[in-house]
Image: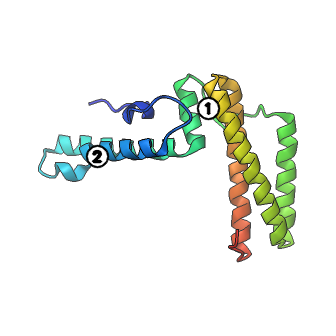
Amino acid sequence: MSLPENYFKLFNLAEQYPLDQKALDAAYHTVLAHTHPDHFAAAGEAQKRAALQWTARANEAYRILKDPLQRAVHLLQLRGIEFEAENNTAIDRAFLVQQMEWREHLEQAAASKDAPALKTLLNELRETARRHIDMLGNLLASKANQQAAEITRQSMFIQRVQDETQTQLYRLNDTTI
């Protein structure tokens, strides 16, 4: 029994970036209803192993399709775009400057324990991430795959800085974000 590499096909969903979350949830539960190892308690070892593999694949597929950035990476990979965000050093110069500014603001605000500055940075990052996700949807719909890959890489960086900013806020015991 071959496990599908295309997570959209696993859940019988259209291969597109915008995704109906309710349809994904329903498809996930349908697959689990047929493959969960608990349903194969009386089966042979081979069937139990296959059920476990299908369930693990369904869990991985669900996690990836639920996350907008991971979904974009998966879709780009299905389109033949090799995607290694960590190894790609070709970054837009303006975005590189913006990255350095965000990092500097984060370091300064964290060092001075400036919660309002961290909140301002977090809000800016969230807004930029939202714009990137919108742009990503348009680029993927128009099959501008290389540009979509670049925006995805940028979005991953934004997410990391967002997470680090959030962590700094929690360290300041300021959970009112």
Quadrant containing the N terminus in the rendered view: top left
Quadrant containing the C terminus in the rendered view: bottom right
Residue at coordinates 71% horizontally, 27% vertically from top-left? 147
Residue 83 disc label:
1
In the figure, is residue 113 to the left or right of 82?
right
Residue bearing the label numbered 2: 52
In the figure, is residue 17 to the left or right of 113?
left
Residue 89 in sight here: yes
Q: Tell me where residue 136 sits by quadrant.
A: top right
Q: x, y (%) of residue 86?
A: 67, 40
Q: x, y (%) of residue 63?
A: 47, 47
Q: x, y (%) of residue 117?
A: 84, 66
Asked if the residue at tag 2 contacts the one at tag 1, i.e. Cβ–Cβ closer than 8 Å, the answer is no
Of 45 and 158, the residue lying toward us: 158
With respect to residue 142, does 135 lie above or below? below
Of 140 and 54, the residue lying toward us: 140
Q: Amino acid at mark 1?
A: Phe
Residue at coordinates 71% horizontally, 40% vertically from top-left? 132
